[in-house]
Image (cartoon, helix red, strand yellow):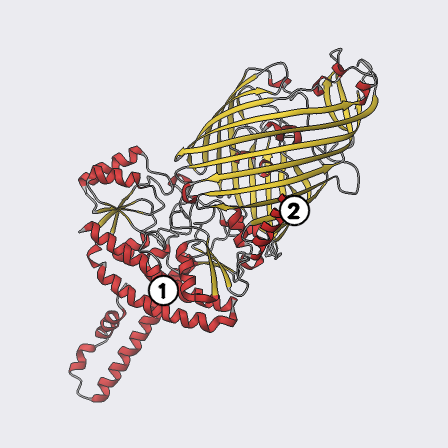
Amino acid sequence: MYRKGTMALAVAAALGLPHAAAAQSQDELKSLREQVRQLDQRVQDAETTAQQAAVQASSRSSGENAMNPAVSVILNGIYSNLSQDPGAFRINGFTPTLGEVGPGVRGLSLGESEIAFAANIDHHFRGTLVASISPDNSSIEVEEGYIQTLSLSYGLTIKAGRFFSGVGYQNQIHAHAWDFTDAPLANKVFLGNQLNEDGIQFKWVAPTDLYLDMGLELGRGRKFPGGPDGGRDKNGVGSSTLFAHVGGDLGTSIAWQTGVSYLSTSPQDRTFDDTDSTGTMVTNSFSGRSRLWVLDGILKWAPNQNPTETYFKLQGEYFRRRENGDLTFNAVNDPTAVALAQTGAYASAQSGWYLQGVYQFIPMWRIGYRYDRLNAGSTNIGLVDSGAIAAADIPVLAAYNPTRQTVMVDWSPSEFSRVRLQFASDKSRSDATDNQVFLQYIVSLGAHGAHKF
Amino acid sequence: MKAILKFVVALSSAAIALPSAAALNVFACEPEWGALAQELGGDKVSVYLATTALQDPHRIEARPSLIARIRSADLLICSGSELEIGWIPLLLTQSGNSKIQLGSPGYFEASQYVVKLEIPKVIDRSLGDIHPGGNPHVHTDPRNIAKIAPVLMERMAQIDPANADSYRSRGKSFLERWQTAIARWERQAAPLKGVPVVVYHKDFSYFINWTGMHEAASLEPKPGIPPTPSHLAELIDQMKRAPAKAIIYSPYNSPQAAEFLSSRANIPAVMVPFTVGGTDKAKDLFGVFDDTITRLLGAVK
């Protein structure tokens, strides 16, 4: 850029400053001086304008891709080597859930592809849509689709639509951001892998330096532990969740959060399939109340809270569920089954937990270990107690404490890609150990995602 | 029962430790903006620093402690230009605070008020973690701070009109001292003109542009991608052909790669503060530039 004085002089020179020397009259000199001053001013103005234009041009706030929502796509593919038939997967001792909880298919397969859109709708609301495309029957499922308030104050946020429930910790995290290929066993048996409710969530963050939040969710009860699949035909609320978290920093290198949540549903005709003592496939159903308590905790260590080089993450959850109501054996009344449809009392008190640690030992590389355990606890089936059917007619509910051990190593060359190798010894079945090997890639295209703590 | 009582006491004492209601609560994404807000605000502001000089502002997690602080903020000051894209959007949606949302007076992106460098012509992730809006590390050129300060001063006056006079008079005094300091730094940094340096990340581009130094290479093969052995090997070759005078890196970078290249290519590796708190002498914005220039002059002698 020209120095403005030099430029003004040069312009003035071109306009005839050399003749100024010849000019005798004081007036002429005066008018020339005035001319130079004006030119100088004009150059200065032009420079200011140019400067402002440059700032503007380099600072056009793009918001989120001008007016388009931020779009991102998640792709993942997996190679699975399973020692047991995944078609016969079950978690013994626990009521089978309605969701997809199995380890998937053997061999090479494409995982669910995910498409996410998010943007501020206006100054009051933000909207998010996350759809997953199933690789096999090309069906699109809305994983999350919700609006969220931006303009409320006092720490209050309201979310409405379909969203991952705030029950526990892992449930709110999208599968592509999980630290292991699959969900903890406890999430599988108590939340059907991952619970996304249709409903409304109220959340309040306290005005304290220590993080404290409290929330209430009112939902349809469209998925396990509610039921039937899709929710009951009723006007009221099908499920309600309460949660609270506290969290903060410990020293300069540790961040922590712990929470408690409670999920209450009243499933009606929540069905599950089992094989009776004659080998006939029967459909049973449960109606009553289901109440789940979850305690969760997470602790992250990174030197000076800078996770670029190395960090360690410890995460654990404890689940406890009580179900009371009626169990109907052979609910669809298959005449070939050992007995016709009949109903008796049902009560169970079951629990489960997992603890996992993930360590990034050098940039890009992480290792992790997870231990899962479920306690079938006590299950009272009235029909079995009265002798109407035998315990062997509902074998999946026979007391058994499943466990699983998992190790993984993953490599993330950038924030947008990850390749993971995972081994698991899964004792979900009472009669066999499933040795599992997964080799998986997960990548994200498009807008930069932001992940929850 | 005792445990519950203890918990209640702990909670209520946390509630008592509320950020001062009288002062303007500033949530500064990076230490440089916290320091600037402190210069302009004095005792009229209560500044919370979301990050320290030892943290990479690209990679911050939306920790509970940050949500707790942003919830009560009156003014959010960030670099912008997608620097904080991995965490600020999440904090904003979780905050339940309408005052600091995008478009509110309490939302301030410093990089919007200066001419940005390195605006990519092609935007593609294969180029690394690039910023479509240009390089966000604008504070490393003190002339940019001189442009941002008056805008921030007016913004603070708008949000907290009761103390507007104080912000303006403090701002005027700061700018006078700052302009004097810039003139001094420009004299001191004159020997740096044309000096080739290797950077770790492209976070000193504005400083290099200001002092007229020459960025010969960066330790990261691509922005945001950590140094790889093959890239370092290339750099050793490059340094043999055309040696740089220094390798500069930030306190939040691991010194390993810089020291490795330093020992192989026989070029001094020098850590510069990058921002307030980066070194013992970088106690405020003036200290950042004093110390940076001193350290660089010492290294390239």
- Say what secondary structure mark 1 lies in: helix
Q: Is residue A253 above or below residue A278?
A: below
**Which residue is outermost to the front?**
B2
> The numbered mark 1 sits on a residue in which chain?
B
Label 2 to label 1, Cα distance in Å?
A: 44 Å
Could you say which is closer to the camera, residue B101 or residue B23? B23
- The quadrant of the picture occupied by the N terminus of chain B is top right
Which three-letter amino acid code belongs to the residue tagged 1?
Ala
Q: Residues within 10 Å of mark 1 (few under 14, many from 20)?
A: some
- Say what secondary structure mark 2 lies in: strand
Which dot, 2 or 1, sits closer to the camera? Answer: 2
Question: Residue A402 in the image: x percent, y percent?
Answer: 62, 22
Task: Using the rendered image of the protein, determine whether residue B24 is visible from the camera's viewpoint.
Answer: yes
Is A262 displayed left or right of B65 in the figure?
right
- What is the count of numbered marks? 2
Q: Residues within 10 Å of mark 2 (few under 14, many from 20)?
A: many
Q: Which mark is residue B146?
A: 1
Q: Residue at x 24, y 88 (%)?
A: A27
Could you say which is closer to the camera, residue A4 or residue B213? B213
The quarter of the picture where residue A2 lies is bottom left
The quarter of the picture where residue A230 lies is top right
Which three-letter amino acid code belongs to the residue tagged 2?
Gly
Task: Using the rendered image of the protein, determine whether residue B193 is visible from the camera's viewpoint.
Answer: no
Question: Residue A351 in the image: x percent, y percent?
Answer: 66, 29
Is A56 displayed left or right of B218 in the figure?
right
Q: Residue at x 54, y 38 (%)?
A: A298
**Which residue is outermost to the left?**
A22
- Residue on which the image places disc 2: A215
> The numbered mark 2 sits on a residue in which chain?
A
Q: Is residue B247 above or below residue A182?
A: below
Is A18 displayed left or right of A348 in the figure?
left
Question: Residue B96 in the image: x percent, y percent?
Answer: 59, 53
